[in-house]
Amino acid sequence: MVFLENDPRVTKVGKILRATAMDELPQLINILRGDMSFVGPRPIDRSEGNPRYKDVSEIPGYNVRRQVRPGLTGIAQIYADKYISPRNKFRYDNLYVRNISFLLDLKIFLLSFWISFKGSWERSGRKVKKGG
């Protein structure tokens, strides 16, 4: 589903839920079931397709990205623009896969918590500075 910058369908409460990532709470069920983790590449949205590719699986980096369980938050969500292309999103996801570690997961988790606390998930651009 594509969301507009100022989507008229989103209520004031909905804006707050999105900005603080509270709309993601149902994903905790998927984490508890073992289908997702707290940190990792976000699940692939089939609408992330690109006219150059018939299927999202044709995007370079797709197979590397599939090697880990999807997560509630990840590098792309923190450091990339909200409207990043699928190809560039996969670059961030693959960076995570190549450097996966407990410390990296902890850093991403804490940064995500901070972004939620500030209510800046819906902001375009990076949510935090690249260094931290």
Image (cartoon, rainbow, N blue to C red):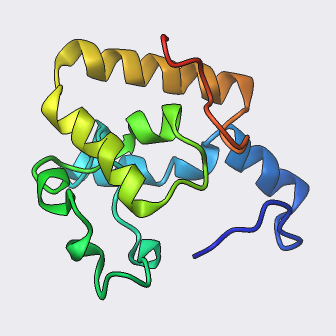
User: On screen, 128 above or below 62?
Assistant: above
Which residue: 79% across, 60% down? 5
Which residue: 68% across, 37% down? 20
Mark count:
0
Across and down, in percent, residue 129 comes to: 58, 17
> In the image, 125: left or right of 48?
right
> In the image, 111: left or right of 55?
right
Which quadrant holds residue 4? bottom right
Q: Give the camera-side residue of 127 and 18.
A: 127
Instruction: Name the quadrant of the N terminus.
Output: bottom right
Q: Give the camera-side residue of 103 and 58.
A: 58
Across and down, in percent, residue 8 comes to: 89, 71
User: On screen, 50 above or below 25?
Assistant: below
Which quadrant holds residue 51? bottom left
> In the image, 69: left or right of 129?
left
Q: Give the camera-side residue of 46 and 59.
A: 59
Which residue of the protein is positioned furthest toward the front in this rendering?
52
Which residue of the protein is positioned furthest toward the bottom in this rendering?
54
Across and down, in percent, residue 3 comes to: 69, 68
Which residue: 51% across, 27% down? 112
Which residue: 60% across, 21% down? 128
Q: Give the camera-side residue of 19 and 26.
A: 19
User: On screen, 93 above or below 33?
Assistant: above
Across and down, in percent, residue 71 comes to: 32, 45
